[in-house]
Each structure stands twice: as C-alpha cells, then as structure tokens.
Image (cartoon, helix red, strand yellow):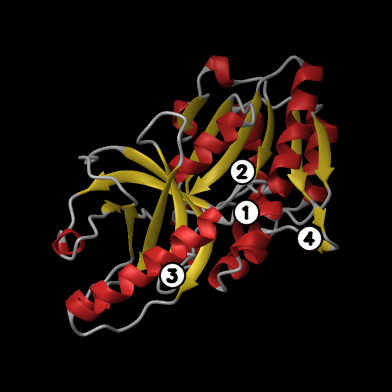
C-alpha cells in the first residue's frame, strides 16, 4: 500500500482513484464494510482503492486538553487498512489551516484537482470542512458537475446497535473486552516497539516488555490477560499486560507493560502486538514493591486461568 503524506506528495500514479474519507479509528466492522464497498467500486472503475484520513484526528486537535482515547495509532490503521486491500492511503495533517478550510475548497483542491477521483464513498453521518459545513448533499453537487460517482455507506448494525468507534471506546473503558470482539472482528490490540523501562518488574521477578502507546490518551487502563504476537513467528504467547500511569513511581503518562509467561529473552527493539483478552482488575495505588509483587503473582495466576479458558 502506498502511503501519501500530504497533498503535495500526490503523484500522477495516485490520481484517478476511488476514495473514502474518515477517521477509521479502530478499523471496526463498520469501517470494514465501507472498505469492501470501496474495493468493489474501485474494481468496477479500474481504479485504485484509496483512503483519506487526517492526522491527528480532528477530535484530538479540537480537544487537546482532554482528547478522546484513540483506538488505533496511524501505523496500526495503515496495517489494518492494507490487510483489507486498500491500495493507497492519503494522510492529511489536521492543523489550523485544515480546520478552517472551506468544505468546497477541500473537495475542489484535494479530491478533484489532487486525486482526480472517479468515485467517492462516505459514511451516513459524514461531515467535513470549516464548521463541519460539508455534507453528502454538497458532495452530490460536485459529483454531478465533475462526473464522479458518489455513494453513501449505511451504518453497520451488530446486535441491534450501530457499530462506532465511540461505542467501542466505551466498552474498552469498562473492561468489556469480549463484547468488543464482534464489533472489531478481532480482539482489541495495541502494537508498538519495545523500549527500555525502569526495570522494576525484573527486580520483582516479573520482567516486562515496555511498549510506547503513541497516544494522547489510552482507551484501556488496568491489568489484563493478553497474548503477544511478534516474538515467535505465527505464535501468540500468553501474557499479562498493564496499561496505566504506574502510581508507585509517580508516573505522569500512560504506559503499556507486558510480562510474557515462562519467557526470558531480549526483545528490545522488537515490534510487538498485544491482544487484550480479559480484564483482571483496575490499577491499585500500591506504596511498596513487596505488596505489588505479591499482587502481580495473583494476577498472573488469574491471567493464566482466563487464557486457558479461552
């Protein structure tokens, strides 16, 4: 999949495509349905299936003091979209200039002059442009004038409820991980590269791989039964994962720490994917490492039991 960073990097080979626009946070089953429709339209048009998204996500830009928890960082989105068959991804920086850009200018400059779209698919609640003034009717007018097709993707319904990033975010916050699986079509995961930490876990007998979250806010907090991909090819290793601020060391930003069971190898620099299977408990304000170590031992027993039960 080609990743195009900014309109100025659009090349002739990227033009004449069929596109969709959105946040695609989580790349959930609603997004997957949009991508399936995109690919079908692209095949019929002999064009490349293209996703246009913004970075940071607009809600992060407008609520910088208290941003919504992000489900997927850009790299995770790109990997998931590539796996669904998207052929090119246009990543547009969302800044003050983009936030104040009129909707009609965005369509004419980016979609028509830049990408020369042959078709466009958007969600049923899609709004864009300054003051969210752009909508499906505006796009229809441009489609009639410039000769590209325009399709509206309807909401994806699961168990009578609309699948959305907001609903998934709420379930994750409440630790209802099993209910997230049918909405995503997979276990929720966080991926990243292993970095050096303070090695407090190793001192307690529970060595951890520390992974940078690359998020302003995490959708998960607490202790989880997990499986880790990326150490042994094709093998998901059982583990226990912690997402939180490490209050015992006065942490100021959320981290992901993973202890892989019966494992003692150097994985610094590895890119790992952590699947979250079940929540064990919330974070607790321990004041000494001995008490924390005893609790982690109990948590590991719970994690092994939960993973063994499926």
Q: Is residue 46 above or below residue 217?
A: above
Compare marks 3 and 1 and give the one earlier in the sequence.
1
Q: What element carries label 4?
A: strand
Q: Is residue 95 above or below residue 235?
A: below
Report crowding for label 3: few under 14, some 14 to 19, many 20 or more residues within 10 A (C-alpha): many
Determine if residue 61 is in view.
Answer: no
Relative image position of residue 181 (x, y in whole percent)? 65, 54
- Residue where numbered disc 3 is placed: 221
Relative image position of residue 174 (x, y in whole percent)? 57, 74
- Residue where numbered disc 1 is placed: 129
Q: Residue at x 32, y 75 (%)?
A: 295
Q: How far apart are marks 3 and 1 (CA)?
A: 34 Å
Q: Distance between the residues labelled 3 and 2?
A: 38 Å
Q: Distance between the residues labelled 1 and 4?
A: 25 Å
> Do the residues under discs 1 and 2 have CB atoms within 8 angstroms?
yes
Q: Distance between the residues labelled 4 and 3?
A: 25 Å
Compare marks 1 and 4 and give the one earlier in the sequence.
1
């Amino acid at each position: 999949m080609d990743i195009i960073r900014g309109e100025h990097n659009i090349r002739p080979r990227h033009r004449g495509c069929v596109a969709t626009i959105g946040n695609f946070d989580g790349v959930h089953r609603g997004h997957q349905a949009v991508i399936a429709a995109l690919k079908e339209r692209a095949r019929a048009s002999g064009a490349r299936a293209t996703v246009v998204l913004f970075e940071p996500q607009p809600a992060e830009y407008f609520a910088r003091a208290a941003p919504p928890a992000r489900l997927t960082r850009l790299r995770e989105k790109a990997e998931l979209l590539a796996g669904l068959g998207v052929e090119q991804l246009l990543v547009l920086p969302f800044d003050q200039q983009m936030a104040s850009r009129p909707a009609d200018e965005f369509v004419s400059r980016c979609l028509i002059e830049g990408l020369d779209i042959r078709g466009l698919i958007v969600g049923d609640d899609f709004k864009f442009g300054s003051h969210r003034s752009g909508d499906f009717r505006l796009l229809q007018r441009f489609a009639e004038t410039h000769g590209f097709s325009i399709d509206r993707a309807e909401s994806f319904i699961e168990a009578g409820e609309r699948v959305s990033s907001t609903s998934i975010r709420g379930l994750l916050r409440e630790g209802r991980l099993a209910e997230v699986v049918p909405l995503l079509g997979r276990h929720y995961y966080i991926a990243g590269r292993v970095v050096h930490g303070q090695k407090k876990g190793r001192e307690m007998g529970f060595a951890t791989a520390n992974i940078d979250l690359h998020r302003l806010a995490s959708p998960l907090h607490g202790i989880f039964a997990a499986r880790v991909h990326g150490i042994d090819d094709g093998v998901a290793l059982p583990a226990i994962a912690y997402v939180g601020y490490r209050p015992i060391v006065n942490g100021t930003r959320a981290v992901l720490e993973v202890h892989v069971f019966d494992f003692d190898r150097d994985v610094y620099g590895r890119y790992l994917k952590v699947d979250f299977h079940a929540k064990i408990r919330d974070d607790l304000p321990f004041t000494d490492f001995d008490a924390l170590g005893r609790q982690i031992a109990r948590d590991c027993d719970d994690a092994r039991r939960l993973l063994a039960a499926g």
